[in-house]
Amino acid sequence: ETLAEVAVLMSIWKWRLISILYIILVFCSSSIPDTGKPIIKGEKIISNLAHIPIYALLTYLLFKALYNKISSSTKIWIISALSAFIFGIVQEFYQSLIPGRTTSISDVGLNGIGIGLILIINGRKKNNLD
């Protein structure tokens, strides 16, 4: 393998490691029991809206982890988006097992908004390059 090939492989594995660590972080954060006592005013709204950037970033990280110059970037975006969405659904079911936490269809919707936003942003960047 050439030095350039090794650099590409290292970059891919770097993004895979970052993605795995991010997934663990999201999983751990949803494992924290809800005491029902807000720490700050508006905490519930903030935590709900946080789903948007969390899942936008997750989708982006999955794209970076899966992307290679051989496959279509569109295909990789679709796989990344579906993977993030499925992870979000699994997370919601998992949260129902945590004391004080519940499954929320609105959280799944907010996850979808975040995923959709990153796809729109990517599409605009791509169109501006053409």
Image: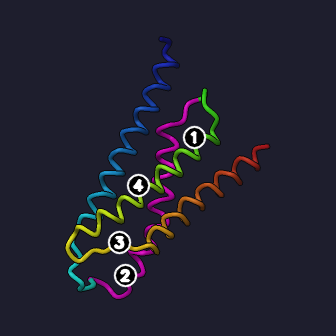
The mark nearer the N terminus, 1 or 4, is: 1
Residue at left offset 60%, top offset 26%: 70
Residue type marked 1: Ile
Residue type marked 3: Thr
The mark nearer the N terminus, 2 or 1, is: 2
Q: Which residues are magenta?
A: 39-68
The mark nearer the N terminus, 3 or 2, is: 2
Residue that label 3 marks = 103
Residue type marked 2: Lys
What is the quadrant of residue 17 in the picture?
Answer: top left
Separation of marks 1 and 4 at Cα, in angstroms: 16 Å
Residue that label 4 marks = 87
Separation of marks 3 and 2 at Cα, in angstroms: 14 Å
Q: Is residue 119 left or right of residue 45?
A: right
What is the quadrant of residue 102 in the picture?
Answer: bottom left
The mark nearer the N terminus, 3 or 1, is: 1
The mark nearer the N terminus, 3 or 4, is: 4
Separation of marks 3 and 4 at Cα, in angstroms: 13 Å
Residue at left offset 50%, top offset 70%: 110
The vertical placement of 117 against 71, above or below, is: below
Residue that label 2 marks = 44
Say which of 46 and 76 sits in front.
76
The mark nearer the N terminus, 4 or 2, is: 2
